[in-house]
Image (tube, grey):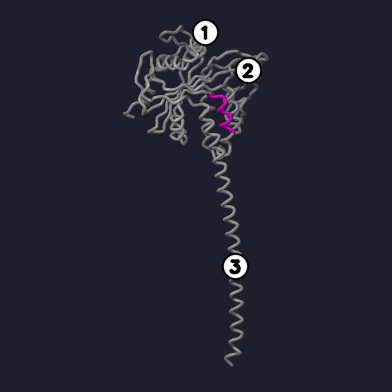
């Protein structure tokens, strides 16, 4: 009797083992697939990371100035000063140049002062009208956008130092570096990011066949590619029925576009466009910033928050042929820059 009952019991146990084995095999296959996908993703990330690193290294090498002794002397306001290797705040003069062959000009139609503070991860970006009247020590008075070209005529190799002195005196703060960006870079960088979205403040129409300018924008929020974004920030005159634009409105648009670009840089989408952006930027940017300083600034400010960026515009009155800066506006900017550099902040 016991043998008869044992045989069905043994059979049931074998069946139970088989039924238990099937899910385990299925589970094992699932984990194998998951592991394979994970390995593939990690491999792809590593390969992409190496690709981006190569692009990034080439970009930095292209735009960086030769390394300098950090204790080297420099000039500010025409006087010799000692530079500190661990300077807290970095002030950078940003010059946007229009190098189109049709124009044969090196006027800087975009002039911005960027003040970066590492301990607070904050920035002040000051823009000024290109026709701003400036009367710097040792130079003939003139429009702000003409001094870089004038400096190159005097001494091409010292042109950046000259403009540093000129605008250091104007803003009453030491300027550490100069960054020159060709308008072509502006256009290509925005295209590399896939365009930006801005609220165009007015209808814009201007055609100039001599240099290929063809600006045609309608008022309203819309996506802009690189060419249209450049048209948006450059628009001044109209020859087809739309209202003309002032330098103050141009400054507002420049800051609007920069803000849109900051948003793009911080988006997930930008991760997959890094290579294109670096290629676009590397061929059209020149700096006086040594490689190590570029690396330090990028690490420090890559995650800067929009609310930590203060935009300021120099206000003035247009009286042909200059924009005469308002004393209170200029002083307000100087005070803000000085406060930004203060150790008490």
Residue 59, relative to residue 156: is it above or below?
A: below
Task: List x then y, in percent, for residue 259.
Answer: 51, 30
Label 3 element class: helix
In the image, which residues are magenta? 276-285
- Between label 3 and label 1, give the one nearer the viewer: 3
Which quadrant would the C terminus be assigned to in this image? top left
- In the picture of the structure, the residue carrying the numbered disc 1 is 321
Task: List x then y, in percent, for residue 211.
Answer: 65, 15
Q: Is residue 225 left or right of residue 304?
A: right
| Category of crowding for the residue at label 3, using alpha-carbon neighbours closer than 10 angstroms: few (below 14), some (14–19), many (at least 20) | few
Q: Is residue 175 visible?
A: yes
Q: Residue at x 55, y 40 (%)?
A: 50
**Distance from the alpha carbon under mark 3 to that under mark 1:** 84 Å
| Category of crowding for the residue at label 1, using alpha-carbon neighbours closer than 10 angstroms: few (below 14), some (14–19), many (at least 20) | few
- Between label 2 and label 1, give the one nearer the viewer: 1
Of residues 18 and 232, the one nearer the viewer is 18
- In the picture of the structure, the residue carrying the numbered disc 3 is 23
Residue 283 lies within the magenta run: yes
Residue lying at the far bottom of the rendered structure: 1
Of residues 230 and 44, the one nearer the viewer is 44
- In the picture of the structure, the residue carrying the numbered disc 2 is 242
Task: List x then y, in percent, for residue 139.
Answer: 44, 8
Badge 2 or badge 3: first in the primary sequence: 3
């Amino acid at each position: 009797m016991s043998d008869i009952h044992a045989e069905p019991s043994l059979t049931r146990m074998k069946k139970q083992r088989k039924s238990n084995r099937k899910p385990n095999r299925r589970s094992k296959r699932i984990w194998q697939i998951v592991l394979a996908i994970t390995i593939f993703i990690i491999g792809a990330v590593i390969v992409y990371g190496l690709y981006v690193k190569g692009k990034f290294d080439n970009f930095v090498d292209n735009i960086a100035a030769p390394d300098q002794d950090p204790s080297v002397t420099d000039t500010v306001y025409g006087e010799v000063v000692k530079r500190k290797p661990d300077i807290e705040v970095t002030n950078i003069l940003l010059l946007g140049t229009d190098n189109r062959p049709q124009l044969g000009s090196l006027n800087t139609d975009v002039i911005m002062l960027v003040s970066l503070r590492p301990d607070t991860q904050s920035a002040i970006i000051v823009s000024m009208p290109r026709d701003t009247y400036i009367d710097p020590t040792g130079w003939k008075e003139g429009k702000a956008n003409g001094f870089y070209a004038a400096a190159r005529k005097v001494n091409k190799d010292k042109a950046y130092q000259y403009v540093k002195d000129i605008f250091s005196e104007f803003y009453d703060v030491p300027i550490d570096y100069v960054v020159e960006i060709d308008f072509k870079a502006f256009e290509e960088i925005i295209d590399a990011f896939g365009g930006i979205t801005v609220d165009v403040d007015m209808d814009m129409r201007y055609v100039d066949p001599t240099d290929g300018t063809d600006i045609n924008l309608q008022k309203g929020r819309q996506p802009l590619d690189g060419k249209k974004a450049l048209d948006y920030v450059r628009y001044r005159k109209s020859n087809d029925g739309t209202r003309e634009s002032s330098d103050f409105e141009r400054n507002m648009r420049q800051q609007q576009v920069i803000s849109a670009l900051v948003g793009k840089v911080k988006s997930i989408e930008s991760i997959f466009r890094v290579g294109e952006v670096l290629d676009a930027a590397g061929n059209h940017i020149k700096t006086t910033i040594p490689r190590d300083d570029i690396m330090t600034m990028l690490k420090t400010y890559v995650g800067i928050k929009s609310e930590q960026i203060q935009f300021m515009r120099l206000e003035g009155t247009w009286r042909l042929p200059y924009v005469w800066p308002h004393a209170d506006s200029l002083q307000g900017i100087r005070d803000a820059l000085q406060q930004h550099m203060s150790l008490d902040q």
